[in-house]
Every structure is written in C-alpha cells, then in structure tokens.
Image: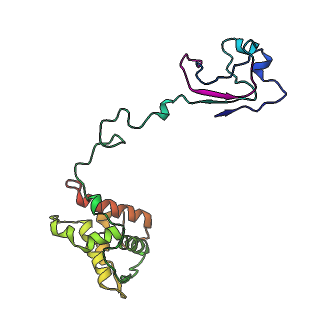
Amino acid sequence: MTIVDGSSEKSDHESAGCNRPSFTSGDVGMDGSCSSSWAVGPTVPSDSPRLKAPVGCLAPTPGAAVYNSTPSSVDRPKDQGQSKACSDGIDLPQKVLFSPDRLSLKWAQVHLIGAGLQNMGNTCFLNSALQCLSYTPPLANYMLTREHSKTCHEPGFCMMCTMQNHIIQVFANSGNVIKPIGVLNELGWIAKHFRYGSQEDAHEFLRCTVDAMQKSCLPGTK
C-alpha cells in the first residue's frame, strides 16, 4: 500500500503540470491490464484536467491511498509448476534413516538422571556436547533399544555404535561418574584436527559428532 501525505506544497509532478488520476475498481492500469484497484481521496470531476494528464506522469493523486491487488510474480501460488512431491524441488531421499512415524519427542520410559562425566584434561568441550546428546529424548530412545548395533556390519569406526555404547553407560551408572574413554579413543576419527588434551570448541565437536553419526548410517561415506 502506498500512502501519500497530502500537503499544501505541490509535488514536483504537479509543478510540472502532471497529475495522475486515481484508479477506481475495474480501471485499466498503465500496462493495459485490468486490476481490482481502489483509491481513497478527493472526488475528481470527469472533466477535470487531472484526468487528461500527459503520458509519463506516474505520481499518485495527492492525499490518496492507492492499493493494487494485481498479483506479482512473488505472490504466485506455491503449487504452480511443481510436479514433484517435495515443495522445494529437491528429489526425495534414496534412503530414509529414521521414519518420522517413529519419532517421539518424549521419553519412551522414565530414567533416573544418568552418570556425570569426568574431565580427562581439557575435555569439558566433549563432556558438554555428549551430555546434550545423551539427554535428547528421540536420540536416547533409539540408542537404548540397541537397534543400530543389531544391524551394523561396520568392522571399523562407527560413531553410531560409539554413541550407543556411551548413552547406555550413562543411564546404567546413575549417580556415579564415568570416563568417556570410548569417545575419546575415537576423537581423531570424529575430526582429524581434534587432539586429546587440546582445548577444542564444543559447538564444533557437536557438529562433527552428528556428521559422523550420519555418515555411519550411509554406505560409501566412510
């Protein structure tokens, strides 16, 4: 909506003798197309010089609020030109890692607060990220079922198996403190630049851990 404040001073177009007529419902726009437009402003007689403005005067009538309902290219319906199931145009995944129908944001069963994690020397970044993952209900519910290890055939490093073992130990040792040795031993596999004993960034470790977990579920990405 374009609002022009009426004032006693004339606009540049008025001083040049250019006055644009205000559209009413059903009028024809400047491009020749019909639009459902309306205008609020002073009534202009049909024989007024304003209606005879020369071509090229684009200023709206002073004191008028002009609205044009003609849809632009940005306002096109989202379903136009879409033949795929995904609205964003991306092909459907070849493999679904976890069905949304099985996803639950609540705990599958009640658990006591799990074990704390001992600082092994500049491992606070690792401990904090592992605690966040351990207390994420959808992930913890899945890991506690041991479903992944039952179908995993990876002989080497598997971040999903490593994370599963860690979460199981956390909830099996409620009230105690455990050492996250299993994750520390795989630190170089999670990210090549991680070094035991070095202070690292917790967010970066979390991102690399989740990425390694995803790669463990996708064949050919090791």
- In the depicted view, which residue is nearer to us: 220 or 65? 65
Instruction: State the image quarter where residue 21 is shown.
Output: top right
Residue 37 inside the magenta-drawn segment: yes
Locate residue 9, reporting x and y percent.
84, 26
- Residue lying at 23% horizontally and 65% vertically, measured from the top left: 158
- Can residue 25 be seen in this snapshot? yes
Spot occupied by residue 146 in the image (x, y as percentages of width and height): 21, 72
Give the quadrant of residue 213.
Answer: bottom left
Side of 5 relative to 106 (left or right): right
- Image color mode: rainbow
Q: Is residue 217 magenta?
A: no
User: What span is in magenta?
Assistant: 29-44
Q: Residue 30: name its quadrant.
A: top right
Residue 192 visible in the current orientation: no
SS assignment for the magenta stretch, majority = loop
Q: Quadrant of the C terminus?
A: bottom left
Q: Position of residue 172 (x, y in %)?
A: 29, 83
Quick check: 167 above or below 213? below
Residue 154: % across, % down: 17, 64
| Most foreground residue, 177 or 34 | 34
